[in-house]
Image (cartoon, grey):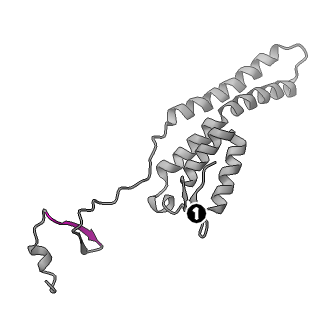
Amino acid sequence: MGNGQGAEKMDRNEFEYYDVGGAPVVFSTGHKRPVNPLRRPQVRYGKMAASVIGLVLLFTAVFFASGFLEGAGIGERIFFSLAASAVYALLLAKKAVIWLVHLYQSRASDATRLRCVFTPSCSEYMILAVEKYGAVIGVVKGIRRLLRCHAPNGGEDYP
């Protein structure tokens, strides 16, 4: 068995073989392949595109509707349009931030995402913080968590 041929003679049903860079690795304890714990959410591009189109349509509608106000110049019309668009954007800010995190989770490599030393991961923490505290405070808390995400820190940390 010392010459490497003994592994070939063993019953293949009893052992699992893995190829790790050309060298076969045998697990005889019945371990299964490691399961990738990363969740890859489905990113809904259509919903975000509809939200952006809605923002543009709202700006345009308020701009033209404010033209019917007596004495409203171009500056006032732009101001009303920006104010209405800002309210709309604030209402959608939570969804937009969560959508961006889902985009990161679906596109980032496993090596990048598995570097996180915390439970839950930093991206999951960002989603939890935004849902709990709102878009502005949640993003601030998420960024502060990202700045702490390195050794010797780590462990369990929930917002």
Q: Is residue 131 magenta?
A: no
In the image, residue 135 above or below residue 155: above
At numbered mark 1, what does the secondary structure look like: helix, strand or loop? Answer: loop
Classed neighbour count for the residue bearing mark 1: other residues with Cα under 10 Å, few (<14), some (14–19), many (≥20): few
Which corner quadrant of the image does residue 22 belong to? bottom left
In the image, residue 3 above or below residue 66: below
Who is closer to the viewer here, 159 or 105? 159
Please tell me whether the stretch drawn in magenta is mainly helix, strand or loop: strand
Who is closer to the viewer here, 47 or 68? 47
Q: Which residues are magenta?
A: 14-20
Q: Is residue 16 magenta?
A: yes
Q: Mark 1 sits on what residue?
A: 154
Q: Which amino acid lies under the numbered mark 1 shown in the image of this protein?
A: Gly
Residue furthest to the bottom in view is: 2
Who is closer to the viewer here, 55 or 119? 119
Q: Taking 15 as reference, is 90 left or right?
A: right
Who is closer to the viewer here, 128 or 76? 128
- Residue drawn at (34%, 60%) of the image: 34
Measured as percent of width and height from the top left, residue 145 is found at 65, 56
